[in-house]
Amino acid sequence: MKNLVEYTTVEVKAIESTDNERFFWLVLSSPGWEWVPGQFVMVRPQAWEFDPFLPRPFSIANMDEEELRIFFQVVGRGTRRLSCLSPGEKVNIWGPLGRGFLIDYERPLLLIAGGIGLAPFIGIIKNHPRPENVELIFGHRRDIKHYPISEISRRILVWCVQDKSHKDLERLRKAVRVKIEGYSPEGQIFACGPLPFLRMIHEICSDQRAPVQVSLERPMACGIGVCMGCSIRGEGGRTYHVCTQGPVFFCNELDMDNLV
Amino acid sequence: MELGVKVGSLFLKNPVITASGTFGYGVEFKDFGELEKLGAIVVKGLSLLPREGNKGVRITETPCGMLNSIGLENIGSQAFIEQILPLLPWEKTPVIVNLYGETFEEFGELASIFAREEAIAALEINISCPNVKQGGLLFGQDVGAACRVCEEVKRSAGDKMVILKLTPASPDIRALARALQDAGADALSLINTIPAMAVDIYTRRPRLSNIIGGLSGPAIKPIAQKLVYDVVSCVDIPVIGIGGIMSPEDVFEYILIGAHAVEVGSANLIRPTSAFDIVEGLEEVALKLGIDSIEEYRGTLST
């Protein structure tokens, strides 16, 4: 079932850093879309005119009739400019884009997030009708206070694992392995984070159970399957566009070792 | 206000055509506007067989523009004809296929495949993609090779109009344009993207995995306009202007210089309603210019 995609203009309601100007909540007036967690939106402030040129894609962290919430990290020019938006500024957006998570609200759900990969799970956690069924393993490098973990942990069980360096995925690997081994075979597993993190999770989960749903990120110009900047390799040599056929994929659809 | 233009044997209801590689296969834009409102559509470049394109990172932003090294990923001629073409409103808006071959023969074969389709209005020949390695011969930069491609295509194209898409990297674009006119080209479209690159000082690597890519966007408009200016003065066949068009005013700039029509490219990526908005905005600009038709405005640049 494909949602109708809309191009529209919304307003900045708030732009707030969670701490020291690296992670931000961008709160926009709601476009009133029907959406599914895992879907994303292309964002381009009107003031940008010709530069920065490209729109930026972000997971919909959460959305209701009032607000569209995006949680992002400043990683370059575009995100730095976004962090300087002011309330009242007009922003062009299009969405909801892509294929979101397939969620069965009756079954247990394990979310595994790496850093900013937490973003697409925020709405799932806040809106899940049975939060007692939901758990989160959260791997992060930066201080936990950057992330909305304290409010999340009031609703669901959270396991935080802080790794100090990229060589340190070992701590996270152990935590995930232990959790998976004990996890209900009925349970669904969703993962979102950097590629090495996703590969590790795929490796741990691939032998035993139902495939993990992963949310991918690739360079995108259009978000609607036209520029072909986001192509990845699937199983059996297929080509997928992350923007239209993802960003959520079942792990076994992907050629995880030769993804890009 | 007569927005219609005649480009060779093709009649377009307005001079706005969507550029290959930026409008997918047309169907992707159905949520953003009515395809019938456009002057014409050029679909993503098609090769005989499907192509995966280049590996790794294939797009990156640059000042007022972007680089792409997609490498002509496409579903192939067969899949396009069977699955996509029937979905396009070809009776209301001309559908132009952009095609790419690795050999002279392939260009000819593609031309004859597409020539059989009633739904296809014209063929745009890509002899200028900077993103594909193929044994060193860049058709667009070698006049002899370019003419041979043109002849192969014309031989097999039946009554379909043949448009040659030119690269800005040509050593002498006027000589190339004249030679292609002699070789039978019905029209020329220019420019394709400009070979360019970007680097990351922290990783010390190119931003594109392919190192080199094609630059597009507002940054290239002045270069494109100069080349269109060069070419219109030395050929009689219609010239279609391409490069950095973001607004209806930009369309009129190219018409002023002498283009018969234009192609809107990167604008579609950064705002999916662009082509439709540009068409909509033409009438208002025409009013300000005090003109009743596109035809009367064409080539009236005073120098």
Image (cartoon, coloured by chain):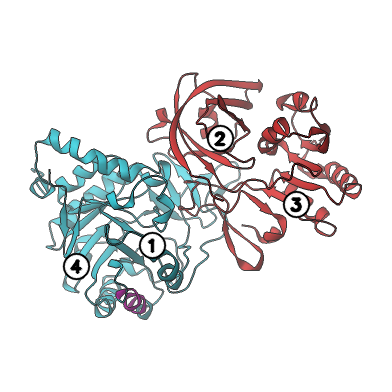
Based on the picture, tell me whether residue B111 belongs to the magenta stretch: yes
Q: Chain of mark 1?
A: B
Q: Give the residue number, with chain letter if any, for mark 2.
A: A76
Q: Spatial distance from mark 4 to mark 1, Cα to Cα?
A: 20 Å
Q: Chain of mark 2?
A: A
**Mark positioned earlier in the residue sequence (4 or 1):** 1
Q: Which residues are magenta?
A: B107-115
B7 up-or-down from A16: above or below:
below
Q: Give the amino acid type for the residue marked by disc 4 in the picture.
A: Asp
**Mark positioned earlier in the residue sequence (3 or 2):** 2
Q: Give the residue number, with chain letter if any, for mark 3.
A: A212
Q: Give the amino acid type for the residue marked by disc 2 in the picture.
A: Gly
Q: Is residue B45 visible?
A: no
Q: Give the amino acid type for the residue marked by disc 3 in the picture.
A: Val
Q: Is residue B65 visible?
A: yes
Picture coordinates of residue A188 (x, y %)?
78, 47
Q: Residues within 10 Å of mark 3 (few under 14, many from 20)?
A: many
Chain letter, red: A
Please give the name of the residue rendered at 38% of the width and 33% of the height, measured from the top-left corner. A49
Nearer to us: label 3 or label 2:
3
Nearer to us: label 1 or label 3:
3
On residue B129, which mark appears? 1
